[in-house]
Amino acid sequence: MLKAIIQYKDDTVIIKFPSNYDISKQLLSVGIEKPAGDIHIKDNEEDEIRVKLYSDSDFGNKLIPLFREDSTLVTVRVAVDLLTKASDEIKGMMEADILYEQYDSINDVFADVKQYLDDLETHTEKFYFPLTGVIDEGDGHMLTVGDVYLKAVENDIKNILDNVKSRDNKNMAEYYDGDEELKLKLISADWDLEYKGEMFYGVVKVKTTEPLTPEETEKIKSFITSQNADGIGESVESECIDTEDGKLFVIFWYGSEDCFLYTEKEMDDFLAAQNTQSMGGM
């Protein structure tokens, strides 16, 4: 669909998109050691690495102007992969919009593709974490309460969470600012509550255009942990629920040894181990 002509010093390499080849190896063939995510689509004489896109198709030539100078080779690769791997239905809609110049930038294309995928064909991974309830009894004493107590005020917790999520009406995935390839793969990240193994947990449903690799899963975990500690979790913690015992605050990340963040499989394994221990104790 697209080709990138990359000039570095006196050497030139052409990279085709889509491609199953390792881009980094192709770049190294002309002495470029920079990661593809750091190489921008720029073709200025003063640039050490010059990149120019071209295509043999009308569709490709309409797509090329949508890549700005802040776009990188990774942006190009992910965009082409998204468009080529999408269903025929999505492809037809996107190609028509691109051919008729309905977009101002490649980010607009990503937004639409992700919306179509969200409606039709996405990959979802769930991440679970325990909730901690703390009651301020009014005398400076803080009382930690258990899961049973939190279950009784489930609707209040959900209301607080919904209010926090709706404040700026923003998809939480947009706050991820790490690995570019993963960022482009992310469709949404939604915080919620769920019963799992007859217990009450916080859960984050992460939708992506394709399954997460083990490395990407760890990066998502770091993102969620950060949000639980300082982002959405901090906002939830700032709200309180009035109870007969005092003001109840719900904490997403307490920082104790009991804190964890598990994928759904890890959570199932954790619960199975707990059940085994419980049966063994009997």
Image (cartoon, rainbow, N blue to C red):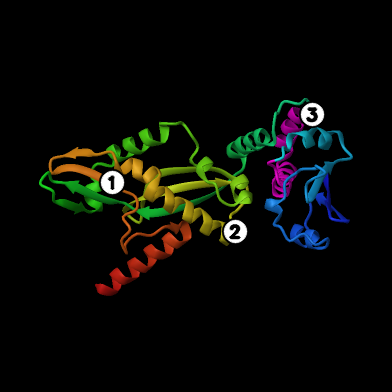
What is the x, y in percent for residue 275? 33, 66
Residue at the location (25% across, 47% down)? 150
Where is 182 relative to 190, above or below? Answer: below
Q: Is 144 left or right of 107, judged from the image as shown? A: left
Disc 3: which residue: 99
Mark 3: few/some/many CA within 10 Å (<14, 14-19, 20+) = some
Q: Quadrant of residue 75?
A: top right
User: Magenta residues?
Assistant: 70-99
Q: Quadrant of residue 245?
A: top left
Q: Nearer the viewer, residue 272 or 162?
A: 162
Mark 2–mark 1 Cα distance, whole angstroms, equals: 32 Å
Disc 2: which residue: 213
Q: Amino acid at mark 1?
A: Val
Mark 1–mark 3 Cα distance, whole angstroms, equals: 50 Å
What is the x, y in percent for residue 32? 77, 59
Q: Amino acid at mark 3?
A: Leu
Disc 1: which residue: 250
Residue at the location (45% across, 62% down)? 266
Furthest-bottom residue in this view: 280
Mark 2: few/some/many CA within 10 Å (<14, 14-19, 20+) = few
What is the x, y in percent for residue 167? 40, 31
Quarter holding the C terminus is bottom left
Q: Is 179 left or right of 97, judged from the image as shown? A: left
